Image: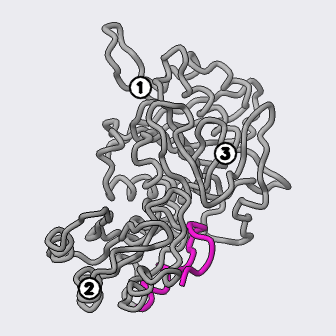
Amino acid sequence: MNYKIVRLNTAAKTEIEHAVLIIYTGGTLGMAYDESGALVPFNFGKILEKIPNLNNLNISVTVISFPEPIDSSNINPQHWVDMAYIIYENYDTYDGFIVLHGTDTMAYSASMLSFMLRGLNKPVIFTGAQLPISAMRSDARENLMTALEIAISKANGKPIVPEVCIFFNHMLLRGNRAKKVQSVHFDAFESENHPALAESGIIIDYNYAAIRPFEEGKKLRYHNKLDNNVMVLKLFPGITKRVIESCLQIKGLKGVVLETYGSGNSPSESWFIGLMEKAVERGILILNVSQCNGGRVIQGRYQTSMDLKRVGVLSGGDITTEAAITKMMFLLANESEDSEIKRKLIMPLAGEMSVLSQ
């Protein structure tokens, strides 16, 4: 790809203290209004005009922009491969990385990169905005400035937040634990099943107990294989046998994230359980996740989920749908044995779930 590269020296002093790489994929933060009032991609070479406070950070900033800004609704696995590759190729040069991304699929991208970048020991912070950077009340400036500060923050010479995160509206969340929950308010993301990693106010208050610790000597490994022969199947009252049967018969389907009710409950009709059993027997992975934002699947708690466990449906514990579907894509492409895929689906790989779920 023909990336656009802009290098900025924000330092007031002669000696640069930190270096950050910003990857601009698209999204509202990187847009500005032109003379006609239309939104157009922002020229990052002029970012100091929009955010003069950058001069106070004494850092070197490099911006790598995708050739054409991508609406996050159009994000696909190749874009994940591109983002992860840029970070991998530049890993030793920068203290931290920021990914500017549209909010709609940010949680999917942050989840996937947490799996693709094994051994990550530096901050990778996704952020964006609900209003363009040129808007009077834009949240873009605060989100970007704080993300930059977190990306360069260290304690005893080590990064404070050495993992993939989302920073939005004063809250730093683990990327593979976050969900978008608002489209018209600034607090767009929540993390119901894992505490916030930090909250920004007058100071940035880090929740050290919730942050994945720095691992001495870890070497970054980059995985670029993904398999998107998967689907999300959300249950609802009245869903028919024909609908579910059609979904499970899709040619080439390898995995299903099954969104069930509450703590993993589903219809108990024999036809439904029978379809699940036949799909598992054909080698299709089925991972049970809760439709509730703060839900946790406990298969066997009620009779309606005990049957799912009996026929081989796997429990996703408290994983989000976004993390579940990306994890499934990752494991299907990077593990050759079905038994190993199943084992890793129900255990945490990058902090995306609390404990072994089944």
Q: Secondary structure at mark 1?
A: strand
Q: Residue furthest right?
A: 156
Residue at mark 1 to residue at mark 3: CA–CA distance: 22 Å
Q: Secondary structure at mark 2?
A: helix
Query: Where is mark 3, residue-wise?
Result: 151
Question: For residue 31, which numbered disc appears in the image?
Answer: 1
Q: Residue at x 75, y 53 (%)?
A: 160
Front tag of 2 and 1: 2
Q: Secondary structure at mark 3?
A: helix
Under mark 1, the amino acid is Met
Residues in magenta, as a range: 339-358
Q: Report the side of 325 relative to 210 (left or right).
A: left
Prevailing secondary structure class for the magenta stretch in the rendered image: loop
Under mark 2, the amino acid is Ser
Residue 322 found in image quarter: bottom left
Q: Residue at x 42, y 20 (%)?
A: 32
Q: Is residue 344 magenta?
A: yes
In this view of the protein, which residue sits in the foreground, 168 or 186?
A: 186
> Which quadrant would the C terminus be assigned to in this image?
bottom right
Front tag of 3 and 2: 2
Are dots 3 and 2 in contact, CB under 8 Å? Answer: no
Q: Residue at x 72, y 69 (%)?
A: 215
Q: Earlier in the sequence, mark 3 or mark 2?
A: 3
Q: Earlier in the sequence, mark 2 or mark 1?
A: 1
Residue at mark 2 to residue at mark 1: CA–CA distance: 52 Å
Query: Where is mark 2, residue-wise?
Result: 270
Q: Report the side of 210 relative to 306 (left or right).
A: right
Residue 171 screen position, x and y as percent:
65, 42
